[in-house]
Image (cartoon, rainbow, N blue to C red):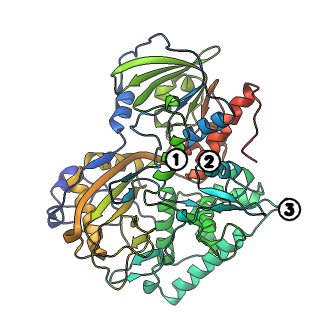
């Protein structure tokens, strides 16, 4: 259930008197909490947000050097899934006069993971759903990445089984005393709670089987194939809380569960979340993608490094001379027959410019009016004041697993009534299970969706020792001896990983405006995709590539079905 955080003074926080606004579920913090010993090392990691702040606050005129090199056909700004899928489609269509620029050290965006000589772990997004044949672009992309090995006679993909989520009891929750092998906190549920939980799941299953007169579904991926029936589209116009109220769901325990799961997916409180988006998540959670019945195989694909594997494989599909990292794009300008781009090379400490027939803005839009100032003067205000949620991921290195009162580790491990969203066991793919006395690395997630701007500032201001204590405090609830087993904890901070999926943002007119090109500048990235998932992000990248080729009268075979 969504609760509004209270305001605080920084002095009171630092004196240990109250909790930060980032933690609406934590109450009664004390001086002793801030003095919690930390018997392990670590550091803060993540995107270089200072670069964006520098551009935002920059007042002096920017240099305007003469363009270098020949005219590009396409310049892609942002090397996440959307930008890379755009480049992939261009290359697959025989177009190689493009360049992908990204300000980070590696391509991938939130598709990030790390490895050492023994183990891998995720620091961003951690899973995708089983690919549906309706996602033609995804099937082609997964084939090129070696994930899809072939197709069944009926058209369904044959996926490399090493990508499947292996554990049958994948979801566990700590309910206050013991661990329970599912994600709904059933040990705390009354008969009425359980009845409402079953009714909600039955309703989601019913929605999953609904189709309109033309056979188009109510939910699914890609969004382009979703029914336009008013009763379906109207669900996007109300909040998920309003939907629950209308349908008579009163259980506080059910609402806690729904809030936890939907904030994990969308980073949006349910009193702001699109009801359509909320039902979409549970539709995907409940059913097998093949027939909406019980799945015979896992319908989740994941890896120890999470979607870092996809980020790396996508990057490997692009030639080395078609991508540059540590390149910060400062300006994009529409000219008569091209786009002019001003770029800062962060490695060589120089500023240069490029020309391209088309540019693809495949980066988060919080800086779009600084980078494309012509946009605002043209009255394109749809990107203003977009609510971006901030995230943190605590990567916890255990020398051996701590105790699990009444249970054992799963893949997705939740804590009831926690400000965190639980943690992922990155060694879940090991069959048989990795021995508890061996090293494990888990990734613990937290989203800060209540007052996004204030919470983002606080997330960035407080350092490693503060956040290490906060995460340790939560771990110790379900693992009293956690501190004794931790050898390292790194804190990854993501300032603008995705736009909140508020009511009206999936099918509404504002998003439709975001999809329109501005001159020769096109817009991609997950923040214009309606729902923040890899499948839609890559769909948009391919869609933009095909739009550009259509505009230039270049023949191609569509990957959009």
Residue marked by disc 1: 313
Q: Residue at x 59, y 81 (%)?
A: 198
Residue in the foreground of this view, choosing between 173 and 300: 300
Quadrant housing residue 160: bottom right
Q: Where is residue 36 drawn, in percent x and y?
A: 16, 65
Crowd class of label 1 (few under 14; some 14 to 19; many from 20; radius 10 Å): some
46 to the left or right of 154: left
Q: Residue at x 64, y 24 (%)?
A: 520
Q: Residue at x 85, y 62 (%)?
A: 213
Instruction: Say which label, 2 or 1, has the lower sequence index.
Output: 2
Q: Tell me if residue 510 can be seen.
A: no
Residue marked by disc 3: 213
The answer to whether mark 3 and mark 2 are in CB contact below 8 A is no
Q: Where is residue 496 drawn, in percent x and y?
A: 43, 44
**Helix, strand or loop at mark 3:** loop
Single out the residue that lies furthest toward the right.
213
Quadrant housing residue 48: top left
Residue marked by disc 2: 144
100 to the left or right of 508: left
The answer to whether mark 3 and mark 1 are in CB contact below 8 A is no
Q: Is residue 465 above or below residue 290?
A: above
Q: Where is residue 79 drawn, in percent x and y?
A: 50, 38
Residue in the foreground of this view, choosing between 52 and 147: 147
Instruction: Say which label, 3 or 1, has the lower sequence index.
Output: 3
Q: Is residue 180 above or below residue 457?
A: below
Estimate the spatial distance between the alpha carbons at disc 3 and disc 1, rounded to whole Å.
40 Å
Quadrant housing residue 443: bottom left
452 to the left or right of 368: left
Estimate the spatial distance between the alpha carbons at disc 2 and disc 1, rounded to whole Å.
9 Å
**Helix, strand or loop at mark 2:** helix
């Amino acid at each position: 259930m969504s609760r509004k955080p209270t305001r605080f003074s920084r002095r009171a926080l630092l004196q240990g008197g109250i909790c930060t606004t980032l933690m609406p579920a934590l109450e009664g913090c004390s001086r002793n909490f801030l003095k919690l010993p930390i018997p392990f090392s670590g550091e803060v990691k993540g995107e270089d947000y200072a670069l964006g702040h520098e551009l935002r606050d920059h007042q002096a005129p920017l240099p305007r050097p003469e363009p270098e090199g020949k005219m590009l056909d396409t310049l892609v700004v942002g090397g996440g899934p959307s930008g890379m899928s755009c480049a992939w489609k261009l290359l697959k269509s025989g177009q190689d006069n493009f360049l992908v620029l990204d300000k980070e050290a590696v391509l991938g965006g939130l598709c990030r993971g790390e490895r050492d000589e023994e183990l891998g772990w995720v620091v961003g997004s951690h899973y995708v759903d089983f690919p549906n044949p309706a996602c033609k672009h995804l099937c082609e992309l997964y084939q090129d990445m070696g994930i899809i090995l072939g197709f069944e006679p009926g058209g369904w993909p044959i996926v490399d089984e090493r990508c499947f989520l292996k554990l049958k009891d994948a979801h566990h929750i700590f309910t206050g005393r013991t661990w329970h092998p599912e994600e709904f906190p059933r040990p705390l549920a009354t008969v009425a709670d359980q009845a409402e939980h079953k009714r909600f799941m039955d309703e989601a299953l019913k929605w999953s089987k609904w189709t309109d007169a033309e056979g188009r579904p109510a939910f699914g991926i890609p969004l382009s194939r979703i029914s336009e029936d008013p009763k379906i589209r109207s669900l996007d116009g109300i909040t998920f809380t309003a939907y629950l109220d209308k349908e008579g769901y009163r259980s506080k325990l059910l609402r806690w569960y729904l809030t936890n799961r939907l904030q994990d997916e969308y980073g949006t409180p349910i009193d702001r979340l699109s009801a359509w988006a909320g039902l979409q998540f549970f539709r995907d959670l409940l059913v097998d993608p093949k027939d909406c019945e019980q799945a015979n195989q896992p319908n989740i694909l994941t890896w120890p490094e999470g979607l870092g594997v996809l980020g790396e494989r996508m990057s490997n599909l692009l030639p080395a001379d078609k991508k540059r990292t540590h390149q910060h794009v400062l300006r994009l300008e529409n000219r008569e027959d091209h786009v002019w781009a001003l770029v800062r090379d962060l490695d060589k400490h120089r500023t240069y410019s490029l020309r391209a027939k088309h540019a693809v803005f495949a980066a988060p839009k919080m800086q779009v009016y600084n980078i494309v100032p012509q946009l605002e003067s043209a009255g394109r205000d749809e990107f203003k004041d977009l609510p971006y949620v901030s995230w943190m991921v605590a990567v916890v290195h255990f020398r051996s697993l701590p105790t699990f009162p009444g249970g054992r580790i799963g893949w997705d491990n939740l804590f009831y009534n926690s400000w965190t969203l639980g943690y992922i066991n990155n060694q879940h793919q090991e069959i048989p299970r990795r021995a508890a006395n061996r090293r494990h690395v888990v990734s613990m997630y937290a989203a800060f969706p209540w007052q996004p701007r204030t919470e983002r500032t606080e997330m960035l201001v407080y350092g490693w020792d503060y956040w290490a204590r906060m995460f340790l405090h939560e771990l110790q609830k379900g693992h009293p001896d956690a501190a004794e087993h931790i050898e390292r904890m790194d804190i990854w901070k993501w300032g603008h990983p995705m736009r909140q999926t508020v009511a009206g943002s999936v099918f509404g007119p504002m998003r439709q405006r975001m999809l329109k090109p501005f001159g020769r500048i096109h817009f991609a990235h997950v923040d214009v995709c309606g729902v923040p998932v890899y499948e839609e992000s890559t769909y948009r990248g391919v869609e933009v590539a095909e739009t550009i080729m259509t505009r230039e009268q270049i023949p191609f075979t569509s990957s959009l079905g």
